[in-house]
Image (cartoon, rainbow, N blue to C red):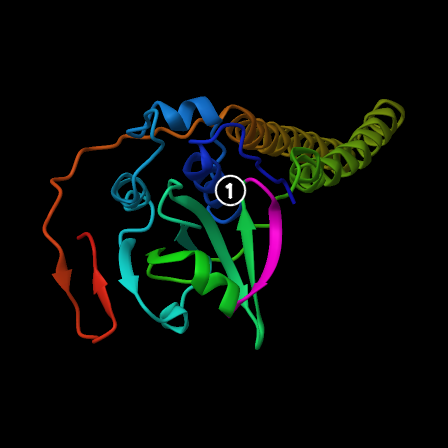
Amino acid sequence: MKQYKQLYQNDCAIVIMLFILNQYLGIDISRNELINQVEFNIKGLSTYSMVTFFKKYLPNTNAYSTTNIDYLKHFPSILLLQKNEYEIGHFVIYIKKTKNKILIYDPFKGYEKINKKKLYKIWKGIFIDFGVSLKLIKKKTKKENIKVNRKPLFIYEFIELGLTITSLYYFTLTLKEPSINNILLLAVSIIFYFTIIKLKLLTFKKVLSEIDKKINHEIVYKLFNLPNKYLKSISSIDHKLLFL
């Protein structure tokens, strides 16, 4: 699995977003492309900016505050950590939990298992929920995709070879023994031959189109600015909705 690493003190959110986009949504985008599409500055990226961005792909994305880590039901989620009052916030991905341990992805350290007690000491109680659990995407390589798509071409080539031999046979037979039957058989062979040629060309065109899409496909991101709305409580006594 590809891992993204934090390069600067203020780019943990960018790394987290790249990880989610690539590993869970299957969207390939470079670090610079992403930075140009969000409100990134010297202080990093705000929770609101992350929520606004992900709403384009996962409309139910929102940020919440809670006092109970067990409230998190969807994985992955994004947690905002802060070790002490002097340090700036740090984003990590909450991958999954077991009975005693929680697996997170820290853009600075990588994967890490920690217990709840330790997490509560450094967690600010703020998290981003996508409204649904996401699964890691297993990507096929371009080579694998092309190999699968070329199978019909091999079948057509095999049939074409057989029809070529058949047509030559009836052509030779017609020259030696001209008859209506031989001429009809030759004509049928030729018709089938050109039909297979046409089908092969259409299939080849389709294969080229699929290859072109996989190699040259570019994801177009069109972001819009949403007004920052007030805090709104939701129906729970220990957590509240931060953004709409």
Q: Residue furthest right?
A: 176
Q: What residue type is labelled 1?
A: Phe
Range of magenta residues: 108-116
Picture coordinates of residue 70, whole percent (x, y): 41, 73
Image vertical order of residue 214 relative to residue 78, above or below: above
Whether the magenta-drawn stretch holds residue 113 is answered as: yes
The residue that disc 1 covers is 19
- Could you tell me which residue is drawn at 70 percent across and 39 percent down? 144
Name the residue located 27 percent from the left edge and 51 percent from the top edge. 59
Q: Is residue 163 shown in magenta?
A: no
In the rendered structure, the answer to whether residue 240 lies left or right of residue 143 reads: left
> What residue is at 46 percent from the left and 42 percent from the top?
16
Taking depth in this image into account, of 211 and 113 the one nearest to the observer is: 113
Q: Quadrant of the rendered structure where residue 101 is?
A: bottom right
Image quarter of residue 223: top left
Secondary structure mainly formed by the magenta segment: strand
